[in-house]
Amino acid sequence: MPRKHHKPEEIVAKLRQVDVLTSQGRSMADAIREIGVTEVTYYRWRQEFGGLKTDQVKRMKELEQENARLRRAVSDLTLDKLILSEAAKGNY
């Protein structure tokens, strides 16, 4: 069975849906089952996206992507620097 990858906006909506269902008197397990995920997934989502709003989640994901891009750039530049320093020493 293929795994479904939920978008951050969908995750926030499902977390809110569980809050609404539990406030209506349903048990936590029933509310989680109704949104179609496991309890482990729900608690992992709640830990990551707990108090965020949809626009905050979008911004967080954008920042994570930018951070990954910058980390790759720094590692590439560090490697280039090491190669050039070795070539300058004559140890090639």
Image (spheres, rainbow, N blue to C red):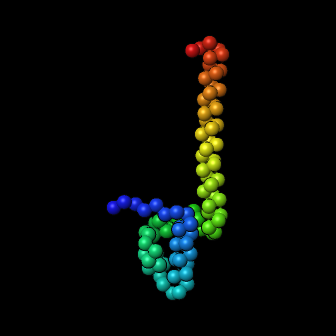
Which quarter of the image is occupied by the C terminus?
top right
Q: Is residue 74 left or right of residue 25?
A: right
Q: Residue at x 47, y 78 (%)?
A: 31
Placement of 79 over or under 85, stated as above or below: below
Q: Residue at x 61, y 23 (%)?
A: 83
Query: Does residue 52 appear in the picture of this structure?
Result: no
Q: Position of residue 73 (x, y in %)?
A: 63, 38
Q: Residue at x 55, y 63 (%)?
A: 8
Q: Nearer the viewer, residue 43 or 84?
A: 84
Placement of 22 over or under 78, stated as above or below: below
Query: Does residue 72 appear in the picture of this structure?
Result: yes
Q: Residue furthest left?
A: 1
Q: Is residue 89 left or right of residue 24?
A: right
Q: Position of residue 24 (x, y in %)?
A: 53, 87
Q: Residue furthest top?
A: 90
Placement of 38 over or under 83, stated as above or below: below
The part of the image, by quadrant, that contains residue 9 is: bottom right
Which quarter of the image is occupied by the N terminus?
bottom left
Q: Residue at x 60, y 29 (%)?
A: 79
Q: Position of residue 20 (x, y in %)?
A: 55, 81
The part of the image, by quadrant, that contains residue 75 is: top right
